[in-house]
Image: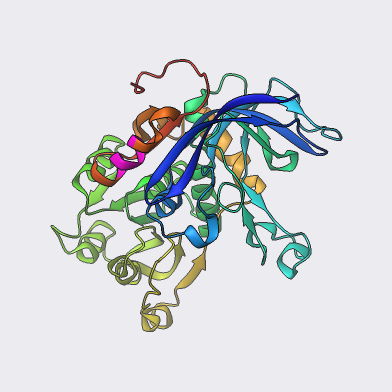
Amino acid sequence: MSRTFTAAFYRGDRTFAVEQITSQAPGQGEVAVRVAYCGICGTDMHVYHGNMDARVGLNRTVGHEMSGTAVEVGAGVDNVTVGQKVVVRPLDPCGDCPACEAGHEHICHNLKFLGLDTNGAMQEIWTVPAYTLHVLPDDLRMDHAALIEPVAVACHAVRLSNVQAGEDVVVIGGGPIGILVAMVARDAGGTVVISEVNPHRLAIARKLNFDTVSPTEADMPVVIQERTGGKGAEVVFEVSGTQSGVDAMTAVAATRARIVMVAIHVVKPEIDLFQLFWRELKLIGARVYEPDDYEKAIAIIASGGVDADTVITDVSPLVDIQKAFEALDTTPTAMKSLIRVGPADRHPLCP
């Protein structure tokens, strides 16, 4: 059945237009999802700033950090039923490249990303392939569930790092992904220190009971050496996306430490390969997530392993999407901003 609903479109020049559109019934293997909440991520901000116009164009509905409810299923769908709470794993692999054939669809050579290469979740009804859906527990709050996608990023990075109970962990960069990596690493048993320059983010990290260090106020490698008895950290996550963060990641690493590159760097960084040789360090790349990471993220959020109420710092209705993006350019206190997309219950943070 067709539905008229509200959608937000990126029009270029840091502008969104909120319009009424009509959807068609889901096709073979598709599911129509009524979106409840959608988070604004760093990639969405890159779109807003015009850095991805060549890829997304000037008529794109962005957004992929979402939660919602299945409202209609197409023919051949057997993994989701109407009324179930769901999240979308927004990857569309080709299925034919060497990575896909090896079982690594998440790093497909021709990977498309829903919400960038296709329209995304900043619309009340989002029709997606059924294989992208993960079913949620009935009692999981929908605003909390909107964190599952970025938590899955953290779960993937922590899984690749093989954090062991009692190991010292340094997370360089205390933004939304860095904070989530820190929480997942702590859930795995790591003893975590977060390095961050933004005082507001440091305050949130301390509220979450993390040890912190500001590299603008102290010699961060020296502090880490002192806190680890001179050995350094067994696991280091680079989540800052800065050259100074890359410099620090080898400086704080223990002998045979595992360093995980999580951030996307705009400029190709210089890496101290001598330290990799001298200390036999392992450098690991971590890109997005796999299905198991989504299931792990759902379990962690459902169990309270992620303090979602602290991470979510503001919520805006879809009609105010322009103001929400503008605020993220000017408000240094935000951690994770959500858009209340559909007719969800009024959120205490939503005006």
Does residue 268 belong to the magenta stretch? no
| Quadrant in the picture for residue 152 | top right
Query: Which residue is outermost to the right?
Result: 76
Residues in magenta, as a range:
323-328
Residue 325 appears at what percent x and percent y?
35, 41
- Residue at x 25%, y 49% (from the top left corner): 212
Q: Up-down: is 14 above or below 170?
A: above
Residue 145 appears at what percent x and percent y?
52, 31
Q: Is residue 342 left or right of residue 201?
A: right
Residue nearest the observer in this picture, 331 or 62: 62
Q: Up-down: is 119 above or below 96?
A: above
Q: Up-down: is 59 above or below 284?
A: above
- Residue at x 24%, y 66% (from the top left corner): 221
Residue 115 appears in the picture as rendered? yes
Residue 309 appears in the picture as rendered? no
The image's colouring method is: rainbow
- Residue at x 41%, y 31% (from the top left corner): 308
Q: Is residue 238 left or right of residue 295?
A: left
Count of numbered circles in the view: 0
Residue 180 appears at what percent x and percent y?
42, 44
Does residue 326 belong to the magenta stretch? yes
Q: Main secondary structure of the magenta part?
A: helix
